[in-house]
Image (cartoon, rainbow, N blue to C red):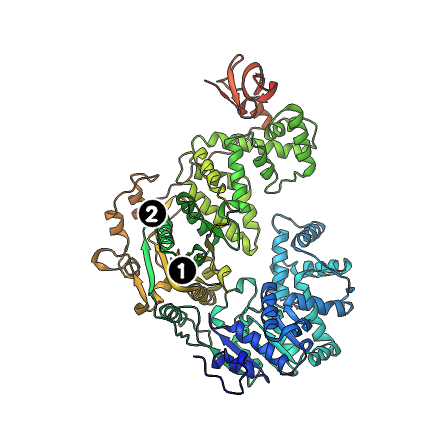
Amino acid sequence: MTLPASSETPEWLARLNEPQREAVLTTEGPVLMLAGAGTGKTAALTHRLAHLIRERLAWPSEILCVTFTNKAAREMRHRVGDLIGDAVEGMPWLGTFHSICAKMLRRHAELVGLQSNYTIIDTDDQLRLLKTMIREANLDEKRWPPRQLAGLIDSWKNRGLLPGDLTAIDNEAYANGKGQAMYAAYQDRLKALNACDFGDLLLHMLTILKTDREVLQQYQRRFKYVMVDEYQDTNAVQYLWLRLLAQERKNICVVGDDDQSIYSWRGAEVANILRFEKDFPGAKVVRLEQNYRSTPQILAAASGLIEGNSQRLGKTLWTELPEGQKLRVVGVWDAPEEARRVGEEIERLEREGAPLEQVAILVRAQYQTREFEDRFIQIGLNYRIIGGFRFYERAEIRDALAYLRVIAQPADDLAFERIYNQPKRGLGAKALENMYRHARAQGLPLAAAALQLADSDELPARARNTIGALMNDFLRWREASESLSPAELMRLVLEESGYDAMLKADRSAESAGRADNLVELARAMEDYETLGDFLEHVSLVMDNDAASDEEKVTIMTMHAAKGLEFDHVFLPGWEEGVFPSQRSLDEGGLASLEEERRLAYVAITRARRRCTIFHAANRRIYGQWTSSIPSRFIEELPDEHIKAETTLSGGKSLWQANWSEQEDPFAHVASTRPERSGSRGPGWQRALATGYETKPARVKESTRSAASFAAKPRSDIAIGARVFHEKFGYGEVLAQEGNKLEIAFEKSGTKKVIDSFVTAAE
């Protein structure tokens, strides 16, 4: 509740509620502003900053104000400017951790062996440098990829560790005990280049502050006040850097919410905010608990859920907004029905006048977006993907589709160019140039030109062998496509091409998500009988007008949604293994479970008016129907604040039935659910009940060379036959040598082509 302003209270402070004003006016000593979701923490932070300057407690240049993103820094500068005018322009120390440390490091670069004009390298430069070093160290690049080493180095720097600080466990994390040596060599190489990476900006400044007391005291005297936004997201090196700078005056104010700490995968440590009072004894804790965003029902449900966490400081959110609707928990049969239901409800909201801009679908993992994208394309519902690409635009999906396109249509040069060296096969730009030159000279598709080059002396022996093996693979996969389903074919290709192995070797945080996306792609393909049907469907989806100015539904991950708000929020996939993520639980145990619960809290509190949670009774993975157990987070929601809408026999909701102790909670569903039309065969219910799994038929590895494939003629094409070529059109076969044909095309003249690229014409 906002207190009436006293005669002494400035009008711009009177707009704040009592806890916000308390946080603003408590200027001396450490302050922890514990700000719940939607409680106006940005307003409190900006007003506090403006107050320090307006009351002349410090010059703008004497305040260090740190944010996590450039966008947040710009917004803060703008809002403070609205309060105090041009004085905000004199704040050189308002910015992100990296931008502020970069400015500091320019002044003291020589203390860490750099010059002031050092270069900051990006990720691509870093990976190229590490790749060179790995080769120089005679390490197997496939077993110990550069991206893995880059991820380890980044994690060490986030923890504030120099090479000499690594533990034995850290050292063993790369190349069987070479982690420390490679890290040290990398740092030496950067110094020789007068360069640093983004992690160095903070690590170098922490090193300087710890080792040069004069520099430390200089900044401690300069900064009369230190303010930090989103403190719960700080990692170890950021925490140590801030603590050093604030330790002298102790006028540090941090703003954060321990219940919204969801970024441990990138180094954030919730412990930093939990131990603030221990780090700064006597700290004043101001709890911002009045929510201005969500209805009481939404807040009560979210608060009841987060109480399941033990590692939290605790607060009670409340609001003066109308009661609103209870959280809806909707059980559906499967993922396609989930997408249909969400689509129908969004269309209903649109008919009722709700703007699509105020509707969001928040998923736990990127692969979940595919089902919604396909459905929305079918019904003509505009959508946007925030914080990532649309499903079929993601690199790994485009790679997989390129393989399939070459199998379906060997003349697809664009697809072949994308994957001829993906994963890396040692075929560089020179090999591609030779293939294109030969293709243009012979009037051939790129793949056919590659096959001919494999039998020539135009390329080095290694490149010829590699191309020959690849073309051998494509010929074998093309044969396999006649007996395998599209999904089975794709799994075979990803395994035999080395793409799966490449993702497994890549131990970055993104790799697991890329693998999940490919699993979802295979699931999507199970609905199509032929490869051609599926590729046509993808083409239609990709033709979605992304440039349209019309309003669109927002689809994004829960992580990307932090800090945003929408009137209507849909939360699909609340099932064990999906959310909470099984991978996270396996890797982090109880700590990860608590972070997953915080993520659920964040997701629910994005909603202003309505929040709907969906869970499916079944998920199909690799052709196997499995019964899904509703997320434990659904059971933890307070009963009085939720409405379960789907019921089974006996009036039990679907999620209640699943959490009961019956031996097979879905057995009766499989026996009573009417069979549905589509791609499912008559035995699909039995598959659900028995755990039946269709394993892809495997094609034996061919030992034939590319040349032997090229020499085998087609039995259905002879001299004089009328044929069709995708690129050159219709023509008549003039001569035949092995699998090479000379064809007089009606519109393209006489060409020499490989017989696998033509079909017999009617």
Residue closer to the observer: 672 or 440: 440
Q: Quadrant of residue 532?
A: top left
First in residue order: circle 1 vs circle 2: 1
Give the x, y percent position of residue 743: 58, 17
Give the x, y percent position of residue 393: 53, 45
- Binning the other alpha carbons within 10 Å of mark 2 as few (below 14), some (14 to 19) or many (20 upward) gives few
Q: Horizontal placement of 672 versus 62: left or right?
A: left
Give the x, y percent position of residue 524: 42, 43
Per the image, label 2 sits on a secondary structure element best described as: loop
**Circle number at residue 689:** none
Question: Looking at the picture, which amino acid does disc 2 mark?
Answer: Gly
Please, is residue 16 above or below residue 562 in the view? below
Q: Horizontal placement of 133 versus 84: left or right?
A: right
Q: Write the residue at 65% across / 59% down.
A: 179
The residue to which callout 2 is attached is 691
Q: Write the residue at 76% across / 60% down.
A: 194
Per the image, label 1 sits on a secondary structure element best described as: strand
- Binning the other alpha carbons within 10 Å of mark 1 as few (below 14), some (14 to 19) or many (20 upward) gives many
Q: Write the residue at 59% across / 41% down.
A: 422
Residue closer to the observer: 214 or 325: 325
Whether pointer 1 and pointer 2 mark residues with C-beta atoms closer than 8 Å, the reply is no
**Circle number at residue 568:** 1
Q: Horizontal placement of 10 versus 536: left or right?
A: right
Please, is residue 457 above or below residue 84 in the view? above
Residue closer to the observer: 738 or 527: 527
Question: Looking at the picture, which amino acid does disc 1 mark?
Answer: His
Give the x, y percent position of residue 143: 60, 49
